[in-house]
Image (spheres, grey):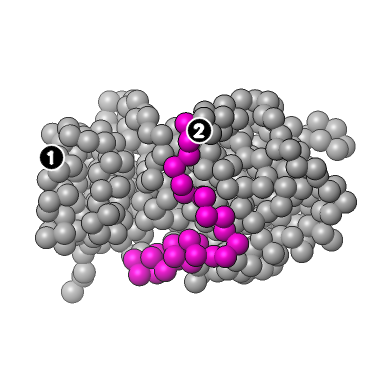
């Protein structure tokens, strides 16, 4: 007997969206057992319908997909997928709590000749999210919240003046550095760290990067997110970090003490300026590994410039993005770190690196900052 995953669709009266999900029903791994026309309908009935995964449009009749997901999680932790069509405008939200959930995905779909083809990635994500062990997810979040080294202000509501200041910092090409003197002799600043993550990554990235000191070498971060999220994600990370955090911009010069986050919908690459400097290139090429930005793209360009001085860190997430880039890093003599299965929300990207025999270190999230510190002092 084949066990199916019960999927609910929240799409208002949108024939196109219904057609998309109905076409996905050809998979014997899940079935659509409920279709709600309003967010309130979903909130009232999803528990009684025993829904395993909810797929919602970004814009609903009575609320946004973000609002629906946040309300659902307060009732019962449930995997969700928010679908945004490429011709839809982004909904402005000051603090997208949806980013904190490791079991929520936001995907963008594009029209092709007036029709949205059934994307394989949607079927895959429904399947993967349905397999997440919720009790493991809850324990993982408590581990992050309660860790003695994590600053308690990470998820507090920021004051309006603080929000304005940070937003200006993340959007500007020139950002005033934090007033902390760098001890340039402490770390090897000839090296660069590249961190890749997808499902379950945002909270873990905030946690890991909060452990880095102010004089850390440059860090390039690729978190799979659609456009419109990275600026706000950088705000949260910057509020909790010793390093300077910014959404990467074309032309940014890599400097110690800075974390550069790839913007949603674009790849982040590096180009060499001289023997001592490199700068970021933001490019609009095709998707790689079904995603943009892709970790592999950043790793390939970093390896071309820094060769054996690249450290690849692959965290939680579905798919295998980061595996081939880590293969290049390994071949050139760099170091590859993979998050272990125990601390993974989705054991996918890091699993592909580990299974390929590319990981020099397989570590939990607490041990990764310490291992990076050890490597960077060599």
Quadrant housing residue 116: top left
Instruction: Indicate the secondary structure of the residue bearing disc 2.
Output: helix
Q: In the rendered image of this protein, does residue 247 appear above or below residue 28?
A: above
Quadrant housing residue 83: top left
Identify the residue position indicated by label 1 in the image. Answer: 37
Residue displayed at 34% across by 58% down: 129
Q: Nearer the viewer, residue 103 or 234?
A: 234
Q: As drawn, which residue projects farthest toward the bottom? A: 1
Residue displayed at 15% across by 43% down: 40
Quick check: 271 left or right of 21?
right
**Rendering coords of residue 347 (x, y %):** 47, 64
Number of the front mark, 1 or 2: 2
Residue 17 forms part of the magenta stretch: no
Quarter of the image with the N terminus in it:
bottom left
Quick check: 296 left or right of 36?
right
Q: In the rendered image of this protein, does residue 86 appear above or below residue 21?
A: above
Residue 331, visible in the rendered structure: no
User: Which numbered disc covers residue 163?
Assistant: 2
Residue displayed at 21% across by 69% down: 3
Q: CA distance from mark 1 to mark 2?
A: 35 Å
Q: Nearer the viewer, residue 40 or 309?
A: 40
Start and end of the magenta stretch? 133-160
Quadrant housing residue 357: bottom right
Residue 246, visible in the rendered structure: yes
User: Which numbered disc covers residue 110?
Assistant: none
Q: In the rendered image of this protein, does residue 121 appear above or below residue 1?
A: above
Among numbered discs 1 and 2, the one appearing first in the sequence: 1
Q: Residues within 10 Å of mark 2 (few under 14, many from 20)?
A: some
């Amino acid at each position: 007997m084949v066990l199916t995953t019960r999927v609910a669709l929240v799409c208002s009266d949108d024939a196109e969206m219904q057609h998309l999900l109905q076409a996905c029903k050809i998979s014997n791994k899940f079935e659509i057992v409920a279709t709600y026309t309003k967010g309130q309908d979903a909130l009232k009935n999803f528990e009684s319908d025993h829904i395993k995964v909810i797929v919602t449009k970004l814009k609903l009749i009575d609320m946004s997909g973000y609002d629906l997901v946040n309300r659902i999680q307060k009732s019962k932790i449930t995997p969700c997928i928010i679908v945004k069509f490429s011709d839809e405008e982004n909904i402005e939200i000051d603090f997208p709590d949806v980013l904190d959930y490791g079991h929520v995905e936001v995907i963008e779909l594009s029209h092709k000749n007036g029709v949205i083809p059934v994307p394989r990635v949607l079927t895959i994500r429904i399947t993967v999210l349905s397999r997440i062990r919720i009790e493991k997810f809850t324990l993982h979040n408590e581990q992050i919240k309660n860790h003695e080294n994590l600053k308690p202000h990470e998820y507090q509501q920021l004051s309006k003046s603080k929000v304005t200041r940070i937003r200006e910092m993340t959007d500007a090409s020139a950002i005033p550095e934090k007033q902390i003197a760098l001890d340039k002799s402490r770390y090897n600043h000839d090296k660069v760290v590249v961190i890749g993550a997808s499902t379950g990554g945002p909270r873990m990235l905030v946690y890991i990067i909060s452990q880095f000191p102010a004089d850390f070498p440059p860090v390039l971060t690729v978190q799979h997110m659609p456009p419109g999220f990275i600026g706000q994600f950088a705000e949260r990370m910057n509020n909790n970090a010793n390093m300077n955090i910014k959404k990467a911009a074309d032309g940014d010069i890599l400097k110690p003490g800075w974390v550069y986050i790839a913007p949603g919908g674009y790849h982040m690459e590096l180009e060499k300026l001289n023997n001592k400097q490199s700068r970021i290139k933001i490019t609009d090429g095709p998707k790689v590994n079904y995603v943009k930005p892709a970790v592999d793209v950043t790793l390939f360009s970093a390896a071309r410039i820094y060769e054996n001085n690249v450290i690849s860190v692959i965290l939680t997430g579905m798919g295998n993005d980061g595996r081939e880039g880590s293969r290049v890093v390994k071949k050139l003599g760099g170091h590859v770190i993979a998050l272990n299965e125990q601390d993974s929300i989705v054991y996918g990207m890091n699993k592909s690196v580990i299974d390929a025999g590319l990981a020099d270190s397989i570590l939990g999230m607490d041990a990764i900052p310490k291992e990076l510190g050890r490597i960077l002092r060599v």
